[in-house]
Image (cartoon, grey):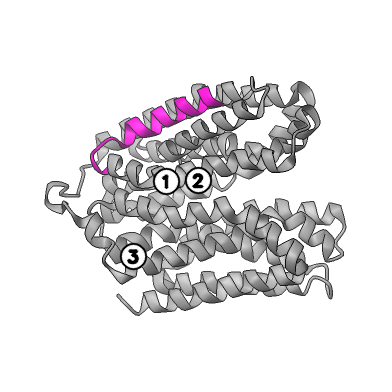
Amino acid sequence: MSRQSLGVWLLAIGQTLGFACMFYSFAALILSLDADLGWDKRLFALGPMLAIGISAVLAPVMGRLVDSGRGQALLVAGAVLGGIALFALAQVRTPAQYLSVWAVIGLAQSACLYDVAFAYLVRRYGTEARPRIIRVTLVAGLASTIAFPAGALLAESFGWRGAVLVGAAVMLLITAPAHWFACQWIRAATVVEIDVGGSKGVAVAALRRSVFWGLAGLFGLVGLNHWILINFLVPLLLALGVSHGWAVLAASLVGPSQTLGRFVLMQAEARIGTKRALLITIGMMLAASAALAGVGASGLLIFVFATLQGGAMGIMTILRPVLVADALGRAQFGAINGMLSISSLGASAIAPLVAAALFEGAGPMGMIGASFAMALAALGLAHWLVTQA
């Protein structure tokens, strides 16, 4: 294996561990946190929501830094900052400390997770970035599969503070070095294809194009559809009559289904093309909501839902940078992609509040109906976007 290929795989490992430690750690440890600290559950949820919100606001800034050649510095520094923040999280005693640390985690997330990694690969590889992005996401899709059992085992053995300290060590001793070596080896084997000097003003000009706002709407709808269902999936399935054990099993299959969806796309996209892949993916989300609505008639439909919903979201992770680059070009890709990240990250930040309001106000079927409507609107936007090229 060449150093260039090894660099891409190391970046994939860094992304996997970064997501496991900084993104999925909250969900994996929430029961242990609650038992130890005893705070209001809404306060616990506010921490990761704050982090995602900060990450969304900072996404365009981070994108511009990647465009200016600082991608490696961001990926490494973000991992180091994440490790320091997790070390601090293990020490918190008050709500103010808890929220302050999550704000720093949001800064670390914005510097070293998907958006920066993808922008870095696009800058280094140009039109050849897609297969590298697929490799990264294939591995990183296993982050939740690693985080939940590891978090449960560590929390049981050492408490949630010990588990978070292990996460801090992983970020500092594995993720940061993996990102550094990955970027060194990728840089040594590639030539930057983008003429940064000749692309000034491209990001600002993108804001005046209707396709930019179409993509923003599409990414926001897809993110909201996915996260309102995933955040409340277990209580939603319980309300539909599914047993707790089966509900947890179905929820645990969403992550592996993302990896499966990416693998299928890798095999099939050359034959079907990006535009058709997009329409099929949104169609999968529609079918997933329909399957969820039919769970009362057949409990097996929970697995159909998990497979379709997880697969669709996994594919969208790959399609998103490709869609942005194809529709708006690769010049100042980091800045443009960062601006578009505001809608998707913002959707994931507000999803718990939207989900709670829908669940309490409209009931489980009303919540499923809302998710179906979001997917239908996303399909309409997707159809419009594929006709613009």
Q: Is residue 157 left or right of residue 81?
A: right
Q: Is residue 279 above or below residue 128?
A: below
Asked whether the viewer can see residue 257, the reply is: no
Quadrant in which the C terminus appears: bottom left
Quadrant in which the N terminus appears: top left
Label 1 near label 2: C-beta < 8 Å?
yes
Residue in the image at 79% along x and 61% along y? 237
Q: Is residue 319 above or below residue 36?
A: below
Q: Amino acid at mark 1?
A: Val
State yes or no: residue 156 in magenta.
no
Q: Position of residue 119 (x, y in %)?
A: 34, 47
Q: Amino acid at mark 3?
A: Phe
- Range of magenta residues: 67-85
Q: Position of residue 204 (x, y in %)?
A: 24, 56
Secondary-structure class at tag 2: helix
Q: Nearer the viewer, mark 3 or mark 2?
A: 2
Q: Is residue 38 above or below residue 276?
A: above
Magenta region's main secondary structure?
helix
Which residue lies under the disc numbered 3?
A: 212
Instruction: Tell me the number on the disc at residue 57.
Output: 1
Label 2 near label 3: C-beta < 8 Å?
no
Residue in the image at 71% along x and 51% along y? 252
Q: Nearer the viewer, residue 270 or 136?
A: 136
Secondary-structure class at tag 1: helix
Instruction: Give the crowd class for mark 1: few <14, some 14-19, many >=20 residues within 10 Å.
Output: many
Cα distance in 3D space between marks 2 and 1:
6 Å
Q: Position of residue 19 (x, y in %)?
A: 55, 40
Instruction: Tell me the number on the disc at residue 315.
Output: none
Q: Position of residue 322 (x, y in %)?
A: 37, 60
Which comes before the other along the chain, label 3 or label 1? 1
Instruction: Give the crowd class for mark 2: few <14, some 14-19, many >=20 residues within 10 Å.
Output: many
Q: Is residue 309 left or right of residue 149?
A: left
